[in-house]
Image: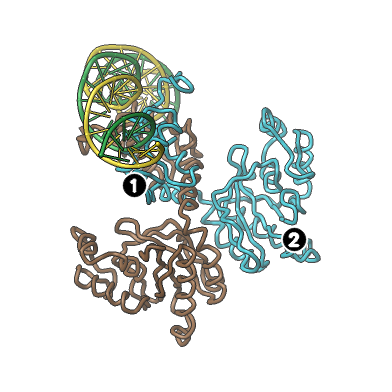
Chain colours: A brown, B cyan, C green, D yellow
Amino acid sequence: MSESANHDIYFVPGLHRGLRVLEILGAAKTPMSLSEIARAMDLSRSSAFRLVYTLRQMEFLKDGEQKNTYTLGAKVLNLGFAYLSNQPITTIARPLLAQLRDTTGVSTHLSVLEGHNVLYLGSHQARSGFVSNMVTGTRVEAYTTAIGWCLLSGKSDSELAAFCKGLDMPPITKHTPTSFQTLKARVDQMRTDGFVVSHGFREPGGSSIAVPVWDQAGKVVACVNLSGPDSGFDFDKLKSFYLPETKATALRISRELGYEGSN
Amino acid sequence: MSESANHDIYFVPGLHRGLRVLEILGAAKTPMSLSEIARAMDLSRSSAFRLVYTLRQMEFLKDGEQKNTYTLGAKVLNLGFAYLSNQPITTIARPLLAQLRDTTGVSTHLSVLEGHNVLYLGSHQARSGFVSNMVTGTRVEAYTTAIGWCLLSGKSDSELAAFCKGLDMPPITKHTPTSFQTLKARVDQMRTDGFVVSHGFREPGGSSIAVPVWDQAGKVVACVNLSGPDSGFDFDKLKSFYLPETKATALRISRELGYEGSN
DNA sequence: GCCAATTGTTTTGTATATAAAACATCAATA
DNA sequence: TATTGATGTTTTATATACAAAACAATTGGC
């Protein structure tokens, strides 16, 4: 047999493998043939055939340019955007983030914690300077970024310890915390300040401001973030302008979520 | 039994139903319980249980706020963005569309034909005026919009006839074509002009310019589109400025795809 | 605080999804 | 052109996914 045996009696193997086909085709930069899929999954060609047949019929796969090759179909886009629009926070935050981008001239982002990663839910790019990569939907390891520290401030110390347990924390830059203690120090600092300002903490030459968003229960549920290359920041105005604007935006979003605190 | 019997021996029912669970949860605006899912799919609770169990384990579903409810998980976002970034045209077009937005000050979009719909692959919102809804990933019936007519110009007359066959075409506005003949007239007009300018053709008070993008085979593969509320357009500059800029952008994208024609 | 109804979970006999093997089709090389 | 290897497709015997039924745990109404 291949990989992990099915200890789980409730598992639906057809579904499991079908979704893996989608994941593999998503990761592949180019369409794949039936045999390639079967090999990548360590599966018989006949079974791969049936999976592809089903996915194709449901329009989750479509034919590639080359004959007998397949790529993700447009249906997966539907699911992705259904996910985004089912997150109420994205629709609330969008106009406010656009406004923050307009008043500051810097790119703005909204992100949440998903497992060990920071997940970008939406962003508004600065108009000047280079156009960065699409960030919505991308993930970054939370322990490595200011946004991550900001989001982790929603966790209790014991939750944070559990978060670190078994987590490999190689340093990205000299600022990266590499242990529970150093990460906790970062998070505690964020808690007392109410924000994180990063100068090249993750990307050399890049700066950002991260401020938490609270829900009606007072829990940290998201993070508003201004970021860009150092060249695009006017550092004199950081504490007098960018930071208060970002905090105001985060608070406005929090208010719309029902937050009544005074952070 | 329920719905359509499984005539297809190659169908993987577990996969089929699992994906339907995702679609139903995507369409639902709020998390659903196991029983609700089972009822919506006309399925036994025990089967729904197994499907949800599998999807949850794979992180395609996650727990909702309420106990025993489920929503789409973040994994579906991965697929959605994998789809987008696997479309080479999106990465080619993105900076050029951003540039077009910057020089014109109007929102720009890239879209392709998917079945009977126009599918928005990416957009760059105008910075002034209201911020429109997220458009990437949304669909509009092709026969109703200037973009649709533009994209349909890639089809031969017989293909267009096949496209209309069995398609219900209720009018959205008084400009909507409602038959093969009237649609063909629209498409032919586009072919001779090389563009479509719409004044309230789909949305009263909204205007847009649509120009096709060609690939190296000379086939229409996408559409570049400027659009916004009438109030945001300077109509005097339409033919002298907006239109040539849009055409230039579309041609630049076409060139990058290998198009060598002179349209 | 009881009862009824609804929901989530487990069990289990049976209908069926599955992978091996056979077959068919194509591409490349000699 | 014949031969080899690989790929897509079909068949089929058997392992197993499935839905009904039983069970457990909630919830809501009176």
Residue ID for mark 1: B67
Q: Residue at x 45, y 63 (%)?
A: A258
Q: Residues within 10 Å of mark 1 (few under 14, many from 20)?
A: few
Q: Quick one: quadrant of the N terminus of chain A?
A: top left
Chain at tag 2: B
CA gap between label 2 and label 1 equals 47 Å
The residue that label 2 is drawn on is B230
Labels 2, 1: one chain: yes
Q: Output the chain of dot 1.
A: B
Residue B79 spot, x, y in % from top left:
42, 47
Whether residue A175 sits left or right of residue B126 in the image: it is: left
Q: Is residue B57 left or right of residue A255?
A: left
The answer to whether residue A258 is left or right of residue B151 is left
Q: Is residue B218 visible?
A: no
| Residue that sits furthest to the bottom in the current view | A236
Nearer to me, B68 or A244: B68
Q: Is residue A255 above or below residue A39?
A: below
Mark 2 and mark 1 lie on one chain; the one further toward the N terminus is: 1
Q: Residues within 10 Å of mark 2 (few under 14, many from 20)?
A: some
Residue A74: x, y in percent?
Answer: 51, 42
Q: Nearer the viewer, mark 2 or mark 1?
A: 1
What SS does tag 2 mark? helix
Q: Residue at x 50, y 52 (%)?
A: A85
Compared across the picture, whether C23 is left or right of A252 comes to left
Expressed as whole percent of the image width and height from the top left, the position of residue B189 reads 79, 44
Indicate the amino acid at tag 1: Lys
Q: Mark 2: which amino acid?
A: Asp
Frontmost residue, B160 versus C13: C13
Mark number, residue A57: none
